[in-house]
Amino acid sequence: MSLSACGGSGAEGDRQHGGRLPNRAAGPPAATAEPPASAVDLGRIPGVGDHLYRRIPDGSRQALVVYGDGRDSPDSTIVYYVKDGDAWSEAGRWAGHNGREGWTTDHYEGDLRSPVGVFTLSDAGGVRDDPGAMLPYDQNSVSYAVPANWGEAHRSDFDYVIAMDYNRRPGTPPSDPIRPGGSDRGGGIWLHVDHGDGTAACVTLPESGMEYLLQTLDPDGVPWW
């Protein structure tokens, strides 16, 4: 099976999983601003401007907002928000990474930038057994195997993944290769286990954070990134 994660091959040669790229960095936020310093009730999620705010799905009660360190930086803070009534509150945060070259509002295959926008999170999977995910979970040690030539640092990249609904068919496993908008627009962009530097387009965070999100993100909460 051809796996096209984290933006696909492009500058990664024959790599069709889009895992993290060794020895470099890049990324801004999927919403632009500094994350709040502490968990407080918020009438509105910090850093999400009007254009993006209007795209938040109706009925959403869960949000994963990625605050990049800069437009061309690979370093991020990932903050999980939940909504109760009209107020959003912070429920978790992790240091992580995004695209090696940063962020873009016009993502193309191989640009090594994570797309800026609002994208639902509908499907999960990974090499490891289902940790109790609320999203549909596709456990497959073949489909999510990291190519041997990626090196030891990447061995756990796809132990757990959550697909971002960018140029994919929601309701299919994260490994689904179909790109409805065309292969040139990239795809296979996942949230997955961090290994310490930038990616081809994915966003990464520690394994403990992935386990927490898999056990927390609920389809009924219409989670988005």
Image (cartoon, rainbow, N blue to C red):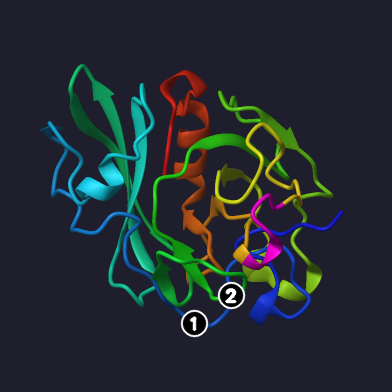
Q: Which amino acid, by three-letter code, is at mark 1? A: Arg
Q: Name the residue under label 2.
A: 21
Specify the segment rendered in magenta.
179-184
Q: Residue 24 carries which label?
A: 1
For image coordinates 66% across by 68% down, the residue present is 184
> Which residue is the extreme one toward the right?
1
For image coordinates 40% across by 64% down, the residue present is 105
In the image, is residue 34 part of the stretch drawn in magenta?
no
218 is higher (above) or lower (below) than 185: above
108 is higher (above) or lower (below) than 84: below
Verify CB contact (< 8 Å) between mark 1 and mark 2: yes
Q: Which of 100 and 39 lies nearest the eye of the viewer?
A: 100
Position of the N terminus, as image quadrant, is bottom right
Q: Position of residue 36 (x, y in %)?
A: 15, 48
Q: Distance between the residues labelled 1 and 2?
A: 7 Å
For image coordinates 47% across by 52% down, the residue present is 206
